[in-house]
Amino acid sequence: MIATKSFYPILAGACLRALACCVDAQPPASITDAFTLEHGKYQVVVDTTQAPELTDWARTELRPVIEKWYPQIVALLPGTSFEAPRRLTVIFQNDPGGPPAYTMRDRISCNIDWFKHNLRGEARGAVVHEIVHVVQHYGEPRPGGEPVPGWVVEGIADYIRWFLYEPQSHGTDIPKPAASRVHFDDSYRTTANFLDWICTTRDREFVARLNAICREGRYQESVWKTLTGKTAPELGAEWRTCNEPRGDASGVAGGFPHHQFHRMTVVSTA
Ligand SMILES: [Zn+2]
């Protein structure tokens, strides 16, 4: 089970490693694919300079995903007066032992070794997850707000990846034996499953509303009750109770409509 890790917003160690690159080596010839989206509104650069063997894949397999999903994710996560970053850089870098990918502001770094071994599996979805982080664009909390918990940040990214981009993958299915042990704040796929349950049972626009509040620096633990009438732990207990009896013969708990695309629309975030 591979989780796409993301160091959000900044991992100091990654910065230090970047500074430690060898200054004596002859730099390789630059290999970049630059293109625009939405009639020039967004500029994208995909840099495979350090991984020329991934260039064809990036142009034929990854670029169409970015072209379709960057604007789509921007539309899925609206906000009052919010403008998504106009530039997006996806760069493939050597990072032995590092995470598959991570995001710093509008720059997505992809681990060459991990991607080479996952081109037919999770590679494209991992970039979609990171694109969500670019669009989330969370800043510091306003006075009275709280830092957005990491499990919320990652849960929203995995919700969009697994339920909207690749629902056919069933990437958040919970094995039946684990149904009684999962927690809503386990982050990544598990929180994505929890968020989908809220969208399915209460409010299809819940993720968009939650994201807007996070981006505006207004996240508080009480936001769950404000939006749904119940606290996060109360919702989590109900979600888990629903999971257990819905486990089916396939051994997968939670009969959520994973195949179903949620028709999220732009909502007022005022
Ligand atoms: Zn992430």
Image: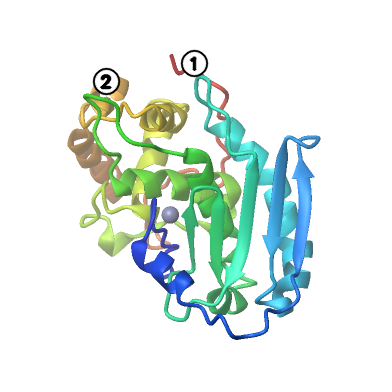
> Horizontal and vertical percent for residue 33?
77, 60
- Secondary structure type for disc 1: loop
> Horizontal and vertical percent for residue 96?
47, 81
Quadrant where the N terminus lies?
A: bottom left
Q: Which residue is mark 2?
A: 226
Other residues around mark 1 within 10 Å, as few (<14) / some (14–19) / many (≥20): few
- Secondary structure type for disc 2: helix
Q: Is residue 234 above or below residue 22?
A: above
> Horizontal and vertical percent for residue 149?
28, 44
Res 268 label:
1
Q: State the residue at coordinates (27%, 38%).
A: 147
The residue closer to the viewer here, 261 or 135, is: 135
Q: Is residue 13 above or below residue 164?
A: below
Q: State the residue at coordinates (72%, 79%).
A: 53
Residue 18 shows in this picture: yes
Quadrant where the C terminus lies?
A: top left
Q: State the residue at coordinates (38%, 40%).
A: 195
In the displayed structure, does residue 234 sit left or right of residue 134? left
In the displayed structure, does residue 29 sit left or right of residue 176? right
Mark 2 CB near ligand 1 (8 Å cut): no
Residue 85 appears in which quarter of the rendering?
Answer: top right
Residue 50 appears in which quarter of the rendering?
Answer: bottom right
In the displayed structure, does residue 178 sit left or right of residue 39? left
Mark 1 CB near ligand 1 (8 Å cut): no
Residue lying farthest to the bottom in this orientation? 25
Q: Amino acid at mark 1?
A: Ser
The residue closer to the viewer here, 186 or 42, is: 42
Q: Amino acid at mark 2?
A: Thr
The residues bearing labels 1 and 2 have C-alpha atoms spaced at a distance of 15 Å
